[in-house]
Image (cartoon, rainbow, N blue to C red):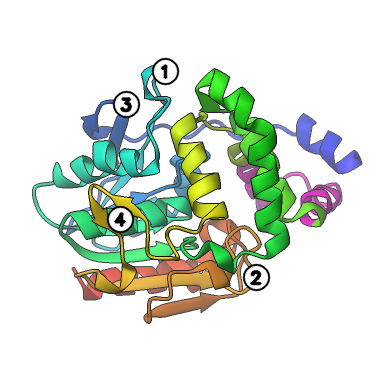
Amino acid sequence: MEGLRTFEAAPRLPPRALAPILASIGRAKLRDFGGSGPPLIFVPSLINPPMVLDLIEGHSLLEWMAAQGFRVLLVDWGSPYPSERNLDIGGHIKRYLVPLIETIGEPALLAGYCLGGTMALAAASLTKVRALALIATPWNFSGFPEVARAEQISLWQAAQSSANRLGMMPMEILQSGFWRLDPARTVGKFADFGAMERTSSHAQRFIAVEDWANDGPPLTFGAAREAFEDFFEKNLTGNGAWCVGGAIIDPTKLPCPTLDIISTVDRIVPAASASGLPNRLVLGLGHVGMIVGSRAPERLWQPLAQFMSSNA
């Protein structure tokens, strides 16, 4: 509790300026982080804001990649319209992601993080891309521990009626689902924060990550239903039965080079839930730490840039 009180009272860094918009499809935008070279599009999860990939000045995956010879672009999903209550995850891919990719006018390199990787995999099956990297991407939901799957299904059963009335799933409910995946860690990280030097870079990253994790627009009811019922409960993706745009999405039939980045210590997306693609990079970093941690540049950023360069 002392760590939590300290976190709440801690000063925040100024918010990052939003990158300029290169293209828009409805509420979804393609933000331009500059750089020269082949286009490299990052696809974040629908859950939480996209800016974890550009979290802190001087320690931003997107800024760093833009300096490595890529034109770096980021999908920003925006906030759902009330009229989109029934738009599911597949609908987001068809309505927003594939058209945004195609605005580039040439095949792009594609990198998806978390659920954004699941969506990027589907997009790479529906439109031409040069290469695809999946970062901490869930696909085979039977790879989640049974207790964790049961917790998510229970959460949905408790929240479904309210979400249906609202037409959306609030971020606060979604965040409680992440807490259920590793409750001991949820408590422990705030206890650890209470002992940190407040002005250290580690403490600043912790604050930025937690503010990001507790922020974000709601999910449409349709996307929440698909995530909990079709993914966690029925495992349509892992069972080869997920259909998007009239096509079954099969990772083994992707027509482009792939890299699947997984972690043996990821509690949010366990390694056993990965797609099973043969070209793998196995890390020992946490779900968010692999993006923003002190070891991220060496362990993930550099191998990712090497893969993309070799397939540009």
Visible residue check, residue 259: yes
Give the Cα distance between marks 1 and 4. 25 Å
Q: Position of residue 116 (x, y in %)?
A: 41, 51
SS class, disc 3? loop
Q: Position of residue 46 (x, y in %)?
A: 45, 41
Q: Which residues are magenta?
A: 185-211
Earlier sequence position, callout 3 versus callout 4: 3
Earlier sequence position, callout 2 versus callout 1: 1
Q: How many residues crowd mark 2 within 10 Å: few (<14), some (14–19), many (20+)? A: some
SS class, disc 2? loop
Q: Is residue 202 magenta?
A: yes
Q: How many residues crowd mark 1 within 10 Å: few (<14), some (14–19), many (20+)? A: few
According to the picture, the residue beneath numbered tag 1 turns out to be: 82
Q: Nearer the viewer, residue 308 or 16?
A: 308
Q: Position of residue 127 (x, y in %)?
A: 17, 54
Q: Is residue 215 left or right of residue 299?
A: right
SS class, disc 1? helix
